[in-house]
Image: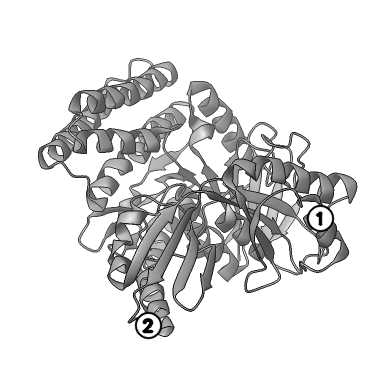
Amino acid sequence: MNTSLRIMKFGGSSIRDADAIHNVIKIIKFQSTQIPMVLVFSAIGKTTSQLLHAGQLAASGNMDNALKVIKTIFNHHLEIANELIPDDDNLIAELIRKHSKIDSLLEAFSQINDLSLKSQDNLLAYGELMSTQIINRYFEKRGLKTILLDARELFVTNIQYTRAEPYWEQSFQRINKTLLPLLKNGQLPVIQGFIGATKTGETTTFGFEGSDYTASLIGAAMNALAIDVWKDVPGVMTTDPELCPDANVISSLSYEEAAALTFLGAKVLHCKTLAPAQRNGIPVNVRPLNEPENRGTTITSGCSSDNGRVKSITYKRNPLTMRLTSHSNILPHQLFHEVSSLFHNLQIQPILLTLTENRITAILNNEFQLQDRLQDLSEWGDLEFNQHTGTISLVGEGLCSFDTSMQKAMNLLKDYNISFISSGASPMQITIGVDKDDVDSVVKILHSHFFEQNGGVL
């Protein structure tokens, strides 16, 4: 392990305005006096979502409103740049050039009335490209020896647009070849999260919140001491604090527990973040921006000392339920083969999958254009979608749906319509299906039971 290197990632909310960026540089200045670092940044605030909205408006023919959204994005970036680095004509000129390129993309979408996944990636990448340009220039002004790099020259990916997967070996070679000389020279590399490029240079993205994944990949490539993901929350919580204000920070999680939480609904990390770090045994720390002296949550290897107890409760209010009822001439094993093959090709991992004699039901993460991508299944039967069921997941190593505490919890829910209880393939999580309008109430009941009355483990 490289004991002299730390990867630090800052998300959109941590750089949402000039004041937030001021706070980030305080953290970096303090940390960089102790250990060399690589810095990874997301787009500013909600820029990625706003860019996607603008692209969708343009593709639907609503060009005027699309341009208004982009103008709002540009003005916000301009405001931050002018506040951080007044009178930097070169920076402003570069932002204007990017604004012009985005407008040209929208015009193209409008003309063909389409926003392909490839075009979407090309558009969304501008969020990170603009944020890192402003941040790098500000850091230089404040005396940090930073250097701005283009992540598309480091990460070689496949052509699975909007959910690209890097070729690890090629990307790791590029990362080390590029970064090691810079670090030896005492420089601070500034890199965009979220984006990469195909072998032919086409821009790709790793999916929303993919900057976490970027940081983890760099950490694994360079065998870093730790990967610090800075958030505007105190760490990973026992549940959503907006639902349960008494939710507490979990001091430690195993890689497996954290991976289950991210997949089942927790928004603290991107779902792919942990795999590269786990491969090399690198701790991932979820650190609180507003209390940088606090540890937050450490995610690492090793068996939990709290085996058999709930660590956290997460939920999804609006997952997509897919129900495929086969035609009379289709055998059950044929139906299962077709569904599993399509899921594999589309890289879809269901939250829950059940098979009866003539029907498959799947609870899925409701991703962009997912229903359209699954329409091929209608060849094999009657295909239906709905969003009536929400999911609530209890996560912790060694959970058992039959223990006394779990049985008491289920008894507390006797007045709710529970559509399923699934223990999954491993004793890491128990997922409950309820009416989507009841999700919030059930989460509160379960959190009170496991963390207030029964002294849940933190």
Whether residue 5 is visible here, answered yes or no, is no
Q: Residue at x 38, y 18 (%)?
A: 79
| Looking at the image, residue 449 lies above or below residue 180 | above
Q: Depth check: 217 or 271 in front?
A: 271
Whether residue 449 is visible here, answered yes or no, is yes
Image x and y of residue 331, in percent:
39, 84
- Residue 411 marker: 1
For marks 1 and 2, the one nearer the N-term is 2
Q: Amino acid at mark 2?
A: Gln
| Looking at the image, residue 242 lies above or below residue 283 | above
Q: Amino acid at mark 1?
A: Asn
Q: Which image quadrant for residue 23?
A: top right
Q: Residues within 10 Å of mark 1 (few under 14, many from 20)?
A: few
Q: Furthest-front residue in view?
A: 328
| Looking at the image, residue 391 lies above or below residue 15 | below
| Looking at the image, residue 19 lies above or below residue 108 | above
